[in-house]
């Protein structure tokens, strides 16, 4: 069976972590062809060609794909779909915008956030905020899938696939790029960070969230937040971890002032080590924590930061 995998490309650069983890899932389905679609994506295509399990890379270098607009990328994928049984991408913000359009154009279902491949037509995915695993079997001729990358290891870089340049498909002209507003940060990207420090409603204010950020910087970590903290205006939306935010599985997850609602746990419960700091000893977060500290975060977090030197 042939698989077309849409690579996660940021500008001209390959998002290696997300793409490599999606490759691991996709190669269980058959021969993997990676599609890089962006402006100046030659370097991204070469990087994708080095991933283990990639048989071929298609490079669609065109200005129409330069800003990740979903409509032209979806049309490109549909124009290539005839040769593939599976169309796959990492479950990133971009792919969540593109894949439903692809599925609609192909008149098939889209199966989102798969966490395991049972066989070529059967997949597992979480439901009920991760409290149950649903097994989905599709009879569609083409399967459109997004991969929850936190559940897969990244493919190595020992591959040597060929790279083929392809022409752009016709641009439907349904949307146009105006501008990107990107917050610059020296911190690692949240979904691929090895350490994440998150704050919740207990932090109390946007100003006090600096405690969380200072600890994260000491650890070289990414900063996360619960939905309650985001809704209260303490942290920006792109820091949100949980069912309606980002799903992370770092080596170390530190939760300060987070009660542990199931919606938040759905986004971080697969972390290797979970450390919880909360003054409420009955907080649900302690049920999943490997290490729990019953303490006021305004005492514990500054002390921990200081001891880290």
Image (cartoon, grey):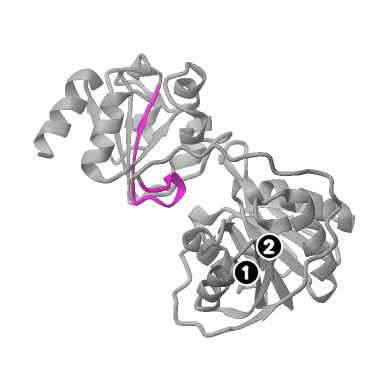
Report the span colored magenta: 188-200
Q: How many marks?
A: 2
Mark 2 lies on a secondary structure that is strand
Q: Residues within 10 Å of mark 2 (few under 14, many from 20)?
A: many
Mark 1 lies on a secondary structure that is helix
Quarter of the rendering occupied by the N terminus? bottom right
Residue 273 image point, x, y percent: 31, 46
Identify residue for label 1. Answer: 26
Instruction: Give me the residue at 82% from left, 65% from top.
Output: 169
Vertical order, 145 against 283 (above or below): below
Residue 184 lies within the magenta run: no
In space, the residues marked 1 and 2 are separated at their CA atoms by 7 Å
Locate residue 105 relative to residue 203 in the image: left or right. right
Residue 59 image point, x, y percent: 66, 72
Residue 126 visible here: yes
Residue 241 visible here: no
Quarter of the rendering occupied by the C terminus? top left
CB within 8 Å, label 1 to label 2? yes
Identify residue for label 2. Answer: 88
């Amino acid at each position: 069976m042939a698989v077309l995998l849409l690579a996660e490309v940021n500008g001209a650069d390959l998002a290696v972590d997300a793409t490599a983890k999606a490759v691991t899932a996709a190669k269980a389905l058959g021969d993997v062809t990676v599609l890089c679609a962006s402006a100046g994506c030659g370097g991204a295509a070469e990087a994708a060609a080095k991933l283990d399990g990639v048989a071929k890379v298609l490079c669609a270098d065109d200005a129409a794909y330069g800003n990740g607009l979903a409509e032209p990328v979806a049309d490109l994928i549909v124009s290539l779909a005839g040769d593939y049984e599976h169309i796959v991408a990492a479950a990133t913000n971009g792919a969540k915008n593109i894949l439903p359009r692809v599925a609609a154009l192909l008149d098939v279902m889209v199966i989102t956030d798969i966490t395991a491949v049972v066989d070529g037509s059967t997949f597992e995915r979480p439901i009920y905020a991760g409290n149950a695993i649903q097994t989905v079997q599709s009879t569609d001729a083409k399967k459109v899938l997004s991969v929850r990358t936190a559940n897969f290891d990244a493919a190595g870089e020992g591959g040597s696939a060929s790279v083929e340049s392809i022409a752009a498909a016709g641009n439907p002209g349904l949307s146009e790029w105006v501008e990107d507003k990107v917050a610059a940060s020296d911190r690692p990207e949240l979904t691929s960070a090895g350490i994440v420090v998150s704050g919740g409603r207990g932090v109390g204010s946007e100003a006090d969230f600096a405690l969380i950020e200072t600890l994260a910087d000491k650890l070289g970590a990414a900063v996360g937040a619960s939905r309650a903290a985001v809704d209260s205006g303490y942290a920006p939306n792109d820091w949100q971890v949980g069912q309606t935010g980002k799903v992370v599985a770092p080596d170390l997850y530190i939760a300060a002032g987070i009660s542990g609602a199931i919606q938040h746990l759905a986004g971080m419960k697969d972390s290797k080590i979970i450390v919880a700091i909360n003054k409420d000893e009955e907080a649900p977060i302690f049920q999943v924590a490997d290490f729990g500290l019953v303490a006021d975060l305004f005492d514990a977090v500054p002390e921990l930061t200081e001891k880290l030197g």
